[in-house]
Image (cartoon, grey):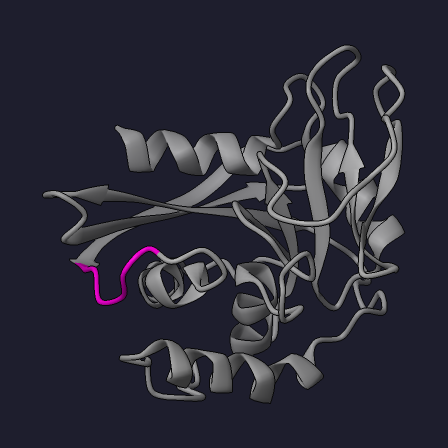
Amino acid sequence: MLQRHPWPQTIEEAIAIQEQLRSEVITENQLETVRYVAGVDVGYDSADEVSRAAVTVLSFPDLQLQQQAVVRSPTTFPYIPGFLSFREVPAVLEALENISLRPDLILCDGQGLAHPRRFGLACHLGVLTGIATIGVAKNRFMGEHSEVGLDRGSWQPLLLEGATVGAALRTQTGVKPIYVSIGHKVNLIGAIEYVLRCAPKYRLPETTRSADQLTSG
């Protein structure tokens, strides 16, 4: 993967990188045939000193595991809300280098545009790799939304400062919503559709579930 910038040591450097790269985020659907979808997740060992990044690649639409990789590397950035990509993306990029199947779409365990500078982890990973990405978060980071219907597929726009930055999406009837946002090269409606197709049985997409199993194992 092309190294677009040095990894920052300070918050000020991180903000400058986010503000520099956010103009490169593509919010239109540029996906054609999707044959492989990937999930990425990061866990931590040794009191957060070691990052454990996992990438799983599944066939689409049947969601069968094709490849997986786990890498361990030193954690180089502290946990600070709004700057998760600087903590996790370096290890994720290393894990992506260890798979031979290039995914058409990556579902990230984190935010995309639903971010104070509109450049969450999914946007950052998408811009650096050139791969389409979607942010799929378990919890709302920011923004507000109306009550989501109880049926699978119901959703409401996630609004921040009057702009739609994502969606609160019910992936299973009667189950707590998840938060979907554009990462790169996909629009919001497309992102919602892909997340639903990747979550046929459970609240979280199979991509996220498979990657999480590797990082927590």
Q: Residue 93 appears in which quarter of the rendering?
A: bottom left
Left or right: residue 45 versus residue 124 is left
Question: In screen coordinates, is 165 left or right of 63?
Answer: right
Q: Position of residue 185 (x, y in %)?
A: 75, 68
Q: Nearer the viewer, residue 215 or 157?
A: 157
Of residues 42 and 99, the one drawn nearer to the viewer in this rendering: 42
Magenta region: 74-79
Quick one: quadrant of the C terminus? Answer: top left
- How many marks overall? 0
The single residue placed furthest to the top in the displayed view is: 174
Q: Residue at x 78, y 25 (%)?
A: 170
User: Which residue corresponds to the image point at 81% horizontal and 61% vertical from the top-left?
Assistant: 161
In the picture as drawn, the residue positioned furthest to the left comes out as 46
Q: Nearer the viewer, residue 11 or 77?
A: 11
Question: Could you tell me which residue is drawn at 72 percent across and 52 percent down?
Answer: 181
At 68% from the left and 50% from the top, the residue drawn is 35
Q: Main secondary structure of the magenta part?
A: loop
Residue 62 rendering spot, x and y as whole percentages: 68, 31
The image position of residue 211, as x and y in percent, is 43, 38
User: How far across and down, in percent of the image, does residue 42 sit?
Assistant: 35, 47
Instruction: Specify whether 100 is left or right of 50.
Output: right
